Amino acid sequence: MTARIFKAAKNAMQAGLAKTKEWQLDYEPAQARVIEPLMGWTSSGDMKQQLSLHFHSKEEAIAYCEREGIAYQVIEPKVRAPRVIAYADNFAFRRTEPWSH
């Protein structure tokens, strides 16, 4: 069974970066999910799909996988470009976009 080690993306519903500093370890599904015919719910006999471990650093997560003998795959996070915006830039002489309001 393979594990994925990654940093979680920021929540799309909020502007903050909460819960994006830690590294997360999730297991790949070992078997496909099955649709229950009566209610339409999905289920699986693989209990490790429900497990999610959090670590402070990538090295801690890798050390855990190596100690437990778990095959792992590290997914590096994409670097966000900082966007510095000031209110005064709306009135700057060098403004290239037309006034929008």
Image: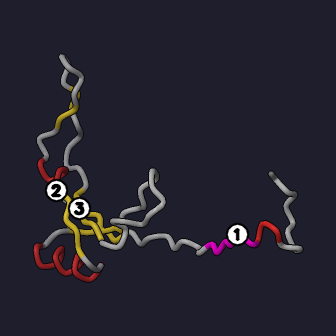
Judge left or right: residue 10 versus residue 59.
Answer: right
Sequence-wise first label, 1 or 3: 3
Q: Is residue 90 above or below residue 57?
A: above
How far apart are labels 2 and 3 at the CA level? 13 Å
Q: Which amino acid lies under the numbered mark 2 shown in the image of this protein? A: Leu
* Circle 1 residue: 87
* Circle 2 residue: 51
Sequence-wise first label, 2 or 3: 3
Is residue 14 within the magenta segment? no
How far apart are labels 2 and 1 at the CA level? 44 Å
Circle 2 Cα neighbour tier, 10 Å, few/some/many (<14 / 14–19 / ≥20): few
Circle 1 Cα neighbour tier, 10 Å, few/some/many (<14 / 14–19 / ≥20): few
Evaluate if marks 2 and 1 touch, with contact meaning CB atoms under 8 Å apart: no
**Residue bounds of the magenta highlight:** 83-88
Judge left or right: residue 86 versus residue 66.
Answer: right
* Circle 3 residue: 2
Q: Quadrant of residue 66?
A: bottom left
Residue 100 screen position, x and y as percent: 81, 53
Could you tell me which residue is drawn at 20 percent across and 20 percent down? 39
Q: Give the overall secondary structure of the magenta segment.
A: loop
Judge left or right: residue 4 versus residue 85.
Answer: left
Q: Secondary structure at mark 1?
A: helix
